[in-house]
Amino acid sequence: MQIDAELCNGCGLCAKDCPLEVISLVEKKAVINAGCVECRTCLRVCPVQAVQEVVQPVAGALVCDRCPVGCQIPPERSGACRRFANRGGELARTRPLVGYQEVVDIVGPEPEEAIRRPLVTAIGAGGTYPDYVPAPYILSDQREGVEVVTVVTEAPFSYSGLKLKIDTDLEVGAEGAAVRFEGRTVGMVETEEYGSKMLALGGVNRLTGRHGFAAARAVAALANREALRLKVQGGAALEVQVGRAPVINGQRVERMRVGCGSASAGLFAPFFKRAADEVIVLDHHITSLFSHHAAGRCLGLTPGGVELCLPRSTPGRYFGRSGSGWGGTDLEDPLAVVAAVDTAKTKPGSTLLITEATGQGAAMYRLSDAGVFEPMPLTPAAAEAVAAIAESCQPSRVSAVYVGGAGGSARAGVTRYPLRLTQAVHAGRAQLTCGGAPVFVLPGGGITFYVDVERVKAGAFTWVPTPATVAPIEYTMRRRDYEAMGGHTQAIRPFKALEPVPWNRSR
């Protein structure tokens, strides 16, 4: 890398973001010191394009091939991630492999087998109010020689919501855009995960806001796997139902991508090498240019002369742009991704395959004598590559996790000392489940859990106009631990006695 001193304004961003801190400011100008590994961070963060990509070979430097960055590591120095170093001309890890026994105390214990499953679920159990009244069912039984207690209740959760995962590359709306149900705001577009869009619905601020009833109904309906129509502000109209394919702007989405464009280059490299002289995988996050990509270079390809119109991330990897076009980009014509062709590197007659990361769309071209790519039918090898992508993709579907905050007053129906219950849950001495399904309890204070709604019986969720959603939860533990936390032992009954505890304010 080189820095143009005339263009540099000394903003210091390159020095702040440089992983190895080899950039300094001298008289309000950035200077690259010894130890630069050409990771290109400075090139990407410079707001005035003062950094120029001029590779300056360093004697004895090693090119690290452990990630797309491709650091050129000088002798006795590490790469940008500090995981690999050039030691004596060999690429070496900077830290040893860690055995499980070295981290077992940090990982912490798992709940013992006897308490991993509840004696009964809370579905249909009803609830109690006010909170200090014992839960409707507190049951005990022998399991594997251990006396086990399960406490169940259908608890109202003001602090609750839903994370909705929609498998699609199609654009649904800008991050942060409002999501509306029946014209009322019930959530927002959150982010994107691997091949999926994420929506956050509900949450205490929405439940207690002016559209709280709509938010509670939407969360409960989706958790119960009912079909719902949602509209993203400035974005798509969605028809979603957990376990089914999403419908976006009237289009049913059949397939989710197997990976981004860069991942596809690595996954299907042998197919791509046979398919064409150059392959582009269009993707709205990372589009790949195969001959420049590490996967192509690893197979002995020489980088071709095709240049893309997208900003480059690392060699062969380019940042895409979201839209309703090919691969979830804004390109309606796939060939528009090509900005230029250097015919000294890519000769006339060369073939180009452009495909989506789902394999649903693909086009092939041949470079004419005039240096223009002209359409041609897919060759058998190209069709085989596209088919390999398509058959590796999963069917698109909608899924959801329900989020509930159980660390509040509802604990009083379990024990007289609520903090002890919280501590027992986090320590694995008490197992929390939702409708019998395992949950993930978030670390930190309180009891906040995630549960996959498809592992909970349909219809188990509801809502009340406080407003709040209602979910079935169970706590299972050894009886001796229940007694130690101040549990309502007078309400314990044998497992076979399934009549609810009579409601009594004196308790």
Image: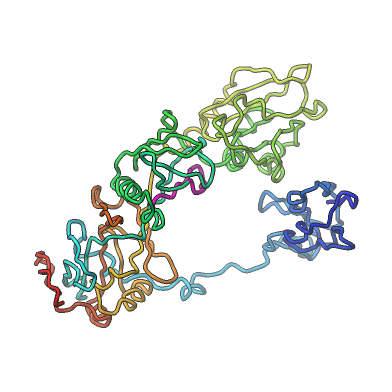
Asked whether 429 or 70 is in front, the reply is 429
Q: Residue 391: where, in percent of width, then height?
A: 47, 34
Q: Residue 22: where, in percent of width, then height?
A: 80, 62
Identify the residue at horizontal 30%, vertical 49% (top origin). Answer: 220
Which secondary structure type mostly characterizes the magenta part of the structure? strand
Identify the residue at horizontal 43%, vertical 28% (top origin). Answer: 251
Identify the residue at horizontal 12%, vertical 69% (top origin). Answer: 503
As for residue 478 lying within the magenta part, the answer is no
Residues in magenta, as a range: 189-202
Please give left or right for residue 274 compared with residue 172 in the image: right
As for residue 199 lying within the magenta part, the answer is yes
Please give left or right for residue 341 compared with residue 203 in the image: right
Examine the image and state in which quarter residue 141 appears.
Answer: bottom left
Residue lying furthest bottom:
484
Q: Residue 441: where, in percent of width, then height?
A: 38, 64
Identify the residue at horizontal 41%, vertical 57% (top origin). Answer: 205
Examine the image and state in which quarter residue 274 appears.
Answer: top right
Q: Is residue 163 above or below residue 355?
A: below
Q: Is residue 498 above or below residue 384?
A: below
Examine the image and state in which quarter residue 203 appears.
Answer: bottom left
Asked whether 283 or 419 is in front, the reply is 419
